[in-house]
Amino acid sequence: MTIEYQFGIYIGRFQPFHFGHLQTLKLALEKVNYLILILGSHRVAPDTRNPWITAERIEMIQACLPPEQLSRIHFLPIRDWLYSDNLWLAAVQQQVLTLTQGNPSVAVFGHHKDASSYYLNLFPQWDYVETGSYANLHSTEIRNAYFAGNHNDYQTKIPPAIADYLEQFQANPRYAALCQEYQFLQSYQQAWAVAPYPPIFVTVDAVVVQSGHVLVVRRKARPGLGLIALPGGFVQQDETLVTAMLRELKEETRLKVPLPVLRGSIIDNHVFDNPSRSLRGRTITHAYFIQLKGGELPPVKGGDDAEQAWWMSLADLYAQEDQFYEDHFQIIQHFVSKV
């Protein structure tokens, strides 16, 4: 073993940790004294793409490694910033700087798999070590087999400790819920498979803020059953975007504010179009920021696709970040950070 760097960085979601991840980790440990393992998608609500929370992923990885190797690894959870690489980079750089104390002997380990690996090019201050692909393994295929109940299809792709963990996780109520979510998404996408072109869905969302509170709903249908979300939905054939947004807002929250007041209180709007923002498929949403005048919060009541509607304080917003549907937390954050 020849140590070439003081610190190594390995970035991934590890959903779940497979033999390819393990191979890369071992390769990195042969070249560095200490490895910073960055776990992305920290504090996102569990779904079929990110089934396991950060603590569970760390537990899985720890079960695969001997104490000597674990003593050289630092786990670093990092939130996603779907609409700002700079904010994500700032978070990574700040945390890494704290851990390395400014030591310049740092290398990033990874593999340029596809377009989603572009982040590997964002660290010119550190060396890059291409690790290659091990047996062409993909976590997506493992998750698909897992939630489809095809457990024999992934056993040879994951370490025994991970196989044991996944088997035990099947007793967790979250597993049954995620299996149902997976089947729903499969049926949803199959229904559009006969379209002549891959569909692009257009939706609208309302970000209504008053007196330090934001109006939210709890979803009562899949996908995202039970998660916190913005009031919103699909645009109908005969609607403008604003008309659709106001209709969805009224239907899902019964907000006791006249439509002319709501329309006149729109102070900003933005398109959120990250290609991976929705598991249903390519979905572009137009969000409208409605700032109501301060005062007593108007009554709301869940309706249509919303089981519940309520005014959430901005303090609770951050405390419940990991219960939000898709990128709705980041949409809210985009607007409230500007006022």
Image (cartoon, grey):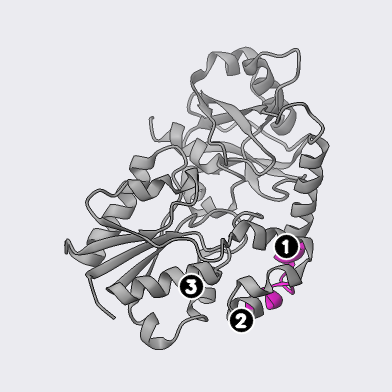
Discs 3, 2 touching: Cβ within 8 Å: no
Residue in the image at 82% along x and 45% along y: 187
Estimate how packed mark 3 is, as few (under 14), some (14 to 19) or many (20 or more) residues with alpha carbons within 10 Å. some
Secondary-structure class at tag 3 = helix
Q: Amino acid at mark 3?
A: Leu
Report x, y in % for residue 70: 39, 81
Q: Amino acid at mark 1?
A: Ala
Of labels 2 and 1, earlier in sequence is 1
Residue 21, placed above or below residue 214: below
Compared across the picture, whether 97 is left or right of 45 comes to left
Residue 99, placed above or below residue 328: below
* Residue 255 in view (yes/no): no
The N terminus, quarter of image: bottom left
Report x, y in % for residue 50: 59, 57
Estimate how packed mark 1 is, as few (under 14), some (14 to 19) or many (20 or more) residues with alpha carbons within 10 Å. some
- Count of marks overlaid on the render: 3
Which residue lies under the disc numbered 3?
Answer: 22
Secondary-structure class at tag 1 = helix
Magenta-colored span:
165-176
Report x, y in % for residue 95: 29, 59
Secondary-structure class at tag 2 = helix
Quarter of the image for residue 141 reads: bottom right
Of labels 3 and 1, earlier in sequence is 3
Q: Which mark is residue 145?
A: 1
Q: Which mark is residue 294?
A: none
Q: CA distance from mark 3 to mark 1?
A: 20 Å
Which residue lies under the disc numbered 2?
Answer: 160
Of labels 3 and 2, earlier in sequence is 3
